[in-house]
Amino acid sequence: MSNPVKVKVKIFGVPALALESREVTLELKENATTDDLLNSISVEDKDYLYVVRGGIRLNRSTKLNDGDEVLVVPPIAGG
């Protein structure tokens, strides 16, 4: 029996403009990864987004845990 993983997601920057809410709670499959999370939200250019948990940028294969709170942010550039 699989146990779904609930993750609270806060989305910032341009990707948030395409969504109705900048904060969502997603229910993902057991052993879900950061890549699974990005594929479950309706934003473009997912290849250029960072997922951050506890101040640390996660790679696409990082496993998510039930109850995680993550940020989805675009890269920031400027001078």
Image: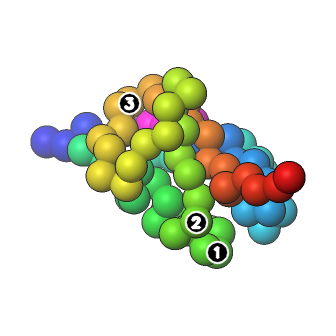
Q: Secondary structure at mark 1?
A: loop
Identified by mark 1, the residue type is: Glu
Instruction: Measure how far apart labels 1 and 2 are at the Cα level.
Output: 9 Å
Residue 45 found in image quarter: bottom right
As helix, strand or loop, the secondary structure at mark 3 comes to: loop
Q: 15 or 40, which lies in front? A: 15
Q: Is residue 7 magenta?
A: yes
Q: Which disc is residue 44 wearing? A: 1
| Residue at the extreme bottom of the image, as rendered | 44
State left or right for residue 36 relative to residue 31.
right
Residue 48's disc is 2
Q: Residue at x 46, y 54 (%)?
A: 37
7 to the left or right of 73 = left
Q: Which residues are magenta?
A: 4-8
Res 29 seen here: no
Residue type at mark 2 is Tyr
What is the x, y in percent for residue 67? 45, 26
Label 3 – label 2 distance at C-alpha: 25 Å
As drawn, the residue found furthest toward the left would be 1
45 left or right, relative to 30? right
Does the magenta-highlighted stretch encompass residue 38?
no
How many other residues sit within 10 Å of disc 1, few (<14), some (14-19) or many (≥20)? few
Tag 2 secondary structure: helix
Query: Secondary structure of the magenta portion, mostly?
Result: strand
Which quarter of the rendering shows the N terminus? top left
N-terminal of the pair, mark 1 or mark 3, is 1
Circle 3: residue type:
Asp
- Horizontal and vertical percent position of residue 14: 80, 62
Q: Which disc is residue 32 wearing?
A: none
Vertical position of residue 11 compared to residue 56: above or below:
below
**Crowd band around label 3 with a 10 angstrom C-alpha radius: few (<14), some (14–19), many (20+):** some
